[in-house]
Image: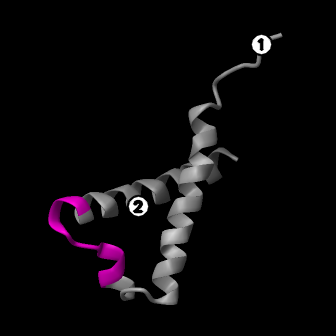
Amino acid sequence: METLQKVLLVITIIGAVNWGLIGLLDFDLVAMIFGEATLFSRIIYTLVGVCGLVNIGILFNHIEPTK
């Protein structure tokens, strides 16, 4: 499970870098590589979003429930 979480985290970081490029330089790397509004680019954006949601669990993974 730890390996899967690391892969998802890497995908999330790649997505964050893409958003940084969009914000700073108005340059969308995903659209440049896979085409703008293509099925594959939409899959990439969705995958990054799902990975981000899964990584929320990593954020709170260390918290022990109180008894």
Q: Count of labels shown?
A: 2
Taking the image as shown, residue 51 lies to the left or right of residue 28, namely right
In the image as oriented, which residue stretches furthest toward the left?
25
Residue at coordinates 29% horizontally, 83% vertically from top-left? 32
Taking the image as shown, residue 62 lies to the left or right of residue 40, namely right
Give the mark nearer the N terminus: 2 vs 1: 2
Q: Secondary structure at mark 2?
A: helix
Residue at coordinates 17% horizontally, 59% vertically from top-left? 24
Callout 2–callout 1 Cβ contact below 8 Å: no
Q: Position of residue 59 (x, y in %)?
A: 56, 34
| Amino acid type shown at disc 1 | Thr
Residue 9 is one of the magenta-drawn residues = no
> How is the protein colored in the picture?
one colour
- Dot label at residue 28: none
Residue 65, compared with residue 7, is above or below; it is above
Residue 45, compared with residue 3, is above or below; it is below
In the image as oriented, which residue stretches furthest toward the right?
67
Q: Would you say the magenta stretch is mainly helix, strand or loop?
A: helix
Q: Position of residue 64 (x, y in %)?
A: 72, 19
Front-most of 46 and 64?
46
Q: Quadrant of residue 47?
A: bottom right
Q: Quadrant of residue 13?
A: bottom left
State the extent of the magenta-drawn residues as a range: 23-32
CA gap, disc 2 and disc 1 = 35 Å
Q: Quadrant of residue 60?
A: top right
Residue marked by disc 1: 66
Taking the image as shown, residue 59 lies to the left or right of residue 13, namely right
Taking the image as shown, residue 31 lies to the left or right of residue 2, namely left
Residue at coordinates 48% horizontally, 71% vertically from top-left? 45
Residue marked by disc 2: 15
| Amino acid type shown at disc 2 | Gly
